[in-house]
Image (spheres, helix red, strand yellow):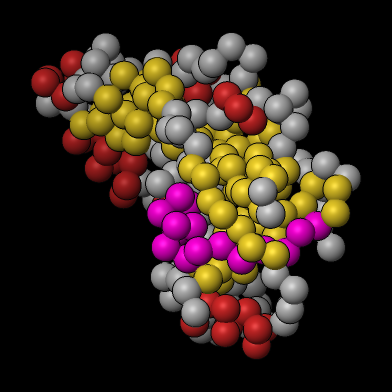
Amino acid sequence: MATTQKKREMLVGTIREQRGSRKSQELRAAGGVPAVIYGLNKQNVAITLDAPAAEKAIHSGAHLLDVEVQGAVEHVLIQDVQYNHLQSVIEHVDLLRIDPTHKVRVKVPLEIRGTAKGTKEGGILERQISEVEMEVLPLQIPDSIRVNVDHLELHQILHVKDIAVPEGARIVNHPEQIVVQVRTVKEQVATEVAPGPAEPEVIGKKPAEEGEGEAAVGKPAGGKAAPAAGAAKK
């Protein structure tokens, strides 16, 4: 296992005096992104970030940023990123102040590296999850965790508990959750076509209308994820 960690991006924020959806639209049209810095029992600060710089930092996959506001530097965690309905334009960013001595919870992507031995025997490497949730000190948050699969034989499975993490960090996912496994084509097909239990017919049950019950799709965060913890913003 190895972790990768990029140098923190430095952004410059300017105080945003005027609020409201109309002012935010004007701000975005002028090349800015509205954001708010909050947490650590300090006053919330509404700021404007340069849109291209903010997009570059967020889409790089980094979790932490340094934001300079009126000459003072705030160390923040990208807590939430709101996009437009097309998921193409960043409309607002929530930035949580961090305490280097207190752990936060973040989602970290997994990088699968190598070629499993079992694939040379006709097996197929199946990836079950692409990220894990981790509790870690803010300044030790990795941008990704590299997982080597060279040793995996046919029918072998790599679980969450097999992933090594930096000292002091902890993966929140269930330890038995499957990360990757090597299976034969026959096993894969058998799983895909296996019939599920028949649902008994309910007399008088109203048919679901079109679109009913669709789950909401989670938004991407610069890729990333957001940790749970921090003061609630106003």
Q: Quadrant of the C terminus?
A: bottom right
- The percent position of residue 207, horizontal first and vertical second, equals 58, 82
Given residues 43 and 1, the one toward you in this image is: 43
Given residues 124 and 187, the one toward you in this image is: 124
- The percent position of residue 150, horizontal first and vertical second, equals 24, 16
Please tell me whether residue 52 is drawn above or below residue 128 in the rendered image: below
- From where the camera sits, is residue 170 visible? yes
Residue at x 11% of width, y 21% of height: 120
Q: Quadrant of the N terminus?
A: top left
- The percent position of residue 200, horizontal first and vertical second, equals 58, 64
Q: Quadrant of residue 111?
A: top left
Direction front: furthest residue = 71
Given residues 98 and 218, the one toward you in this image is: 98
Residue range (magenta): 44-58
Q: Quadrant of residue 136?
A: top right
Please tell me whether residue 24 is drawn above or below residue 44 in the rendered image: below
Residue at x 22% of width, y 22% of height: 114
Please tell me whether residue 231 is drawn above or below residue 136 in the rendered image: below
Direction right: furthest residue = 41
Q: Quadrant of residue 102?
A: top right
Residue at x 75% of width, y 73% of height: 17
